[in-house]
Amino acid sequence: MPCSPSVRPSTSHVYPHTVTRQRETSLTLPQRQTSEDINKQIRASLGMPPKPEVHPTVPVEGHVCDFPIWSYSKRRCSVTSLHIDYEDGSYFSLKAPEGMPSPSFPGYLDCILFYGQHDLFNRNYIEMSVYSIFKTLGLDATNGGIYEMFRRDMKRAVALYMETDRFRDPTTGERCYVDIFHVLQRVRLYKNRQGASIFYFDDLFLDSLRSGYLKRVDFDYCLHLDRDNKPLSRFLYSHILKRLGEKSIYLRNLVGFLYDVGLGYVAQLEPKRRNEALKDSVVPALDAIRGEACSHWQMDDKGNLVFFS
């Protein structure tokens, strides 16, 4: 489920909690690209033909940051389903029989992906201690209550599954399939929190991560939002970053945008209550990522949200 090629690279920021791993992470991908270029030059100098181009075998449209997979508030954790109908006739459906992962879940996920992203290019699992996740997020690693909430979120994430026909076949460009997939296939939690737990990811979910998400999203900034307890801003950051891409402007009508990001229940409110909800949650969340996902944003006189690169 790869990201659109129009994803706009974000400018890396350094935050104190992750600076010790920033050098290792920030150097890996540029070095890999340089190595590929060198290998091509060596093959050419030896008169060897170039390696065959690897064509994509996963959908060329869609991305994990298109779909809301956690709750933005504790009150909404009890939600067990979500459905989005898009104007082009495609759809996205989510079932969460145990309830939606809590607003803390994006922090757990970002820690796992940030510190294990190199392993995910070669395998479908990451080994990491719950203790290190808590320490990265500034949580009390000895607090039993926090650990129980973590276990509950992992159970919810494993139970959660998604269904969509949004993804296009990379060869034909057609929407030929309905994909049903998970975020996590399995979690093995080490009983001692300082031992390495194992998190197994769904293959289709990983295809999306490998296609660009791991390379372009600024995980330092994501963790910054996670520590500030801003789950809606965290989702909007990657969502708008992907939708805007390298374009100068991304325009979306307000109602459609609310459905896109899992806030369809806000779109259904009568105008006065909807405006109140926007002022209380959506507007502050968008303002928090101004200068990161986009340079600025505004609402035009036709009720469209306009995001500028």
Image: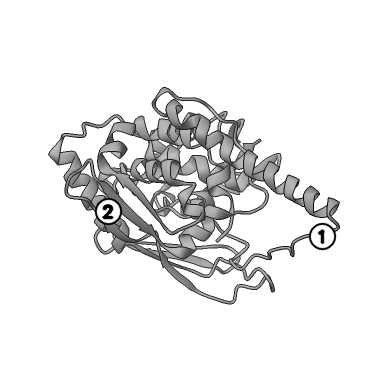
Residue at x 44%, y 37% (from the top left corner)? 233
Q: Position of residue 101 (x, y in %)?
A: 30, 51
All told, the count of numbered labels is: 2
Can you identify the residue that label 1 sits on? Answer: 48
Give SS at disc 2.
Answer: helix
Asked whether the beta carbons under mark 1 and mark 2 sit within 8 Å of each other, the answer is no
Q: Against 204, is 117 above or below?
A: above
Determine whether, in the image, residue 39 is placed left or right of residue 281.
Answer: right
Give SS at disc 1.
Answer: loop
Determine whether, in the image, residue 32 is placed left or right of residue 120.
Answer: right
Determine whether, in the image, residue 252 is placed left or right of residue 111.
Answer: right
Q: Residue furthest top?
A: 16
Residue at x 53%, y 27% (from the top left corner)? 13
Label 1 sits on what residue type? Met
Residue at x 42%, y 67% (from the top left corner)? 181
Label 2, residues with CA under 10 Å away: few <14, some 14-19, many ≥20 = many
Can residue 304 be spotted in the picture?
no
Lower sequence index among marks 1 and 2: 1
Q: Residue furthest bottom?
A: 176
Front: mark 1 or 2: 1
Determine whether, in the image, residue 265 is placed left or right of residue 97.
Answer: right
Can you identify the residue that label 2 sits on? Answer: 154
